DNA sequence: TTTATTAATCGTAATATTGCAATAAACTAA
DNA sequence: TTAGTTTATTGCAATATTACGATTAATAAA
C-alpha cells in the first residue's frame, strides 16, 4: 500500500504521469524556466534565484536529471545545467496529445 | 518541513505545479482519458475499467473535481462525470506556454 | 418498509515527497 | 599542502500521497 500501481496502466499513461510528476513542484517549474531564460548554464545561481537551500535545489535538479529533462556538465568547481532538447520535445508531444484529446461525440450528460 | 514552500513561487509556477500534480498519477490520467473517450458520463464504470478499488477511484475523482478539471452530476444512484471544458482549456494554455518556451540565445555551454 | 445499488467518507497502513543541517567530495587557487 | 568554493550526499523530521476495508449516505426497486 502507498505505492502507485504502475503495472495496471499502459506505457503512455505512466509516461505522462512521470513527466507530470517532474512538473508537479513549483521549484522544479522555476528551475526549468530559469534554465530556459538563461539559456543553459546556471548552477549555484539557482540557489540564489529560488529561495531554497542548496541541498534542496540539488535534490530537485537530480530528479530532473534522472528523468533526462536536463543534463549537467562539470565546469571547474561548478556545474552547468541545460535542457535536453530531445527529451523536452518528447515531453511536449506527450502532453500535446494528452491535452488536445477531443470527444467527437456530441451528447453530453452533465451540463 | 515536508510541505512545499508555495509562497516563494509566483502564481504561474504554482498553477502549473498544481495541474501537473493532477496529471502525476496514471490513474488520474486514465480517468481523464476514459471520460474523454466515453464523452462524459462514466461513473462506477471507471472502477471496472481501471483496476483499482472503488474508494481509491472515488478519491482520485475528488482530487480532479476539487481542481475543477471534471464535474459530477447525480443521476439516480450513480454519478456522471464529465470534463469541465473551460478549466481544461485553461490547463491546456498553461502547459502550452510552459512547454513551448524557447531560448532565443544561441550560445550553449553544455553540449 | 426492506433490500439492493452506487458513490462518498472514515480510518489506517505503507510509502513517497519535501526541506534542510551536517558532511563529504571535487576542484581551484594560494 | 592548505584554504576556499561549489555541488552532491547522508540522515532525518514533517508532511503528503496512495490504497483499501469498513462504513455511511442516498437513491431505486421490491
Image (cartoon, coloured by chain):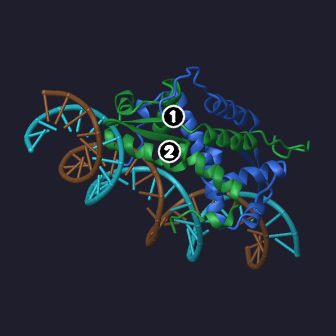
Chain colours: A blue, B green, C cyan, D brown
Of C29 and B4, the residue lying toward us: B4
Left or right of residue B62, residue A35 in this image: right
Q: Which chain's residue wears label 1?
A: B
Residue at image position (75%, 61%) is A46
Mark 2 vs mark 1: same chain?
Answer: yes
Q: In the picture shown, does residue C17 fall above or below A103? A: below
Q: Residue at x 84, y 52 (%)?
A: A38
Residue at which label 1 appears = B32
What percent of the width, then of the height, locates residue B98?
Answer: 73, 44
Is disc 2 surrounded by few (<14), some (14 to 19) or many (20+) residues within 10 Å?
many
Q: Position of residue C8 (x, y in %)?
A: 36, 48
Instruction: Say which element carries label 2.
Output: helix
Q: Are marks 2 and 1 in contact (CB under 8 Å)?
A: yes
**Is A27 situated above or below A22?**
below
Q: Nearest the camera: B37 or A40?
A: B37
Res B110 quadrant in image: top right
Residue under the point 56% across and 39% down: B84
Which quarter of the picture shows residue A93? top right
Q: Give the residue at x 81% y 52%.
A: A41
**B106 with respect to D9 (left or right):** right
The residue lying toward the viewer, choosing from B44 and D26, is D26
> Which residue is tagged 2?
B64
- Secondary-structure class at tag 1: helix
Q: Looking at the image, can residue B83 be seen?
A: yes
Spatial CA span between label 2 and label 1: 9 Å
Left or right side of A25 for C27? right
Tell which subunit mark 2 falls on. B
Residue B107: horizontal and vertical position, in percent?
91, 44
- Can residue A61 be seen here? no
Amino acid at each position: 500500500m502507498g505505492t502507485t500501481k504502475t503495472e495496471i496502466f499502459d506505457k503512455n499513461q505512466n509516461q505522462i504521469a512521470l513527466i507530470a510528476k517532474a512538473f508537479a513542484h513549483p521549484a522544479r517549474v522555476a528551475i526549468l524556466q530559469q534554465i530556459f531564460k538563461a539559456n543553459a548554464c546556471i548552477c549555484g545561481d539557482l540557489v540564489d534565484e529560488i529561495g531554497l537551500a542548496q541541498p534542496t535545489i540539488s535534490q530537485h535538479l537530480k530528479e530532473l536529471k534522472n528523468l533526462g529533462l536536463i543534463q549537467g556538465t562539470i565546469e571547474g568547481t561548478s556545474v552547468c545545467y541545460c535542457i535536453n532538447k530531445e527529451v523536452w520535445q518528447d515531453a511536449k508531444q506527450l502532453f500535446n496529445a494528452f491535452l488536445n484529446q477531443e470527444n467527437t461525440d456530441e451528447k453530453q450528460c452533465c451540463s
